Image (spheres, grey):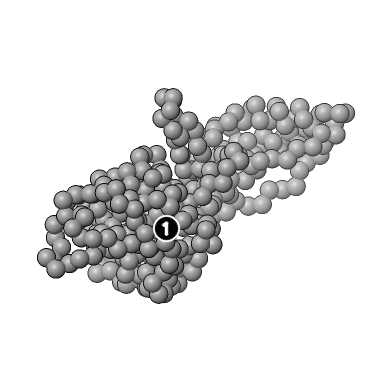
Amino acid sequence: MANTSAQVLTDSFSEILAYNQGSGSVNFYMAHGGTNFGWTAGAGIALYAEEGAGESYQAHITSYDYDCMVSEAGQYGQPGIGGPNKYEMIRDAVKKHMGCEPPASPPPPTIKAYGQVDLQESVPLLEALPQLWPGDGIVSRRPLPMEEYGQGGGLILYRVKVKAEALQNGAELDVSSPVHDYARIMVDGKVVASLDRNKKAKVSLPVLDTFSSDQDLVTLDILVEGIGRDNSGSKFDLKGLMSQDVYLNGDLLEDWRVFPLELKDTALIPFQTLAGSAPKAVSSPSPTPTFYRQVHFDP
């Protein structure tokens, strides 16, 4: 997070106010730290140090505090960061410039430490899919970015049927262009690999020999998460699969079903109560994507 000098800020503020015989005007960005929620995080894109190595995608956290005069929690100054109180210093500068006492500050908010949070409900994403998107998804000959399906953010699930024999000796999945921004690859509901925007568009799938001898087709799912949009430059930062050309062992995959999961209404998620108050232990190192929830009532 940003950490700027309180003295430099105050000096610059006073200098601007004194401009043009004391008629200067100042707007603060930001005067009050804030928090983004949902899928509204930002991101930055920088070039790698090595020439030709591509771009480095760096998602931002949803905390936009920026060491400003009023903290993200509504406190005056920055108690968590320490140092001089910018809020009081700016008030003193206003008092000096105006020649009168500024209005009294509102009382600071009450801040609580909630401690450990035990997640009490969960449901695997694939189990919740019929409630989140009833039916068999959108028919799409080739996969497209989520915006092409009218989706503004969140998760998007691309599903296609492939021959089981193509996966029994290991396979290579090639999505032709890095995903935006992170993807889990699943075969019949089991996570087998992942893709990342900062990595190659190809991934090797493990040997999968657990299919029954008479099983012809299996379900290949690519679940893509849009983590945060680039907030610099002039390009549209689309999310999902960036190429229509997805290959398995060199064979082009077609006839997809697509499930846009913007999750605007989380009441649709059919949560189930966990045994006890904590999440169940995961037996696999690559668990299926799962929703967790804890409801807290603050007296």
In the picture shown, does residue 278 fall above or below 23?
A: below
User: Residue at (22%, 58%) from the top-left corner?
Assistant: 282
| Residue 189 spot, x, y in % from top left | 26, 62
User: Residue at (47%, 45%) from the top-left corner?
Assistant: 61
- The answer to whether residue 25 shows anywhere in this view is yes
Image check: 299 left or right of 117?
A: right
Counting the numbered discs, the total is: 1
Q: Nearer the viewer, residue 267 or 212?
A: 212
Which type of secondary structure does the marked residue at label 1 adopt? loop
User: Residue at (14%, 60%) from the top-left corner?
Assistant: 210
Image check: 93 left or right of 46?
A: right
| Residue 227 spot, x, y in % from top left | 45, 49
Q: Amino acid at mark 1?
A: Arg
| Residue 164 spot, x, y in % from top left | 20, 60
Residue behind mark 1: 142
Q: Nearer the viewer, residue 159 or 44?
A: 159
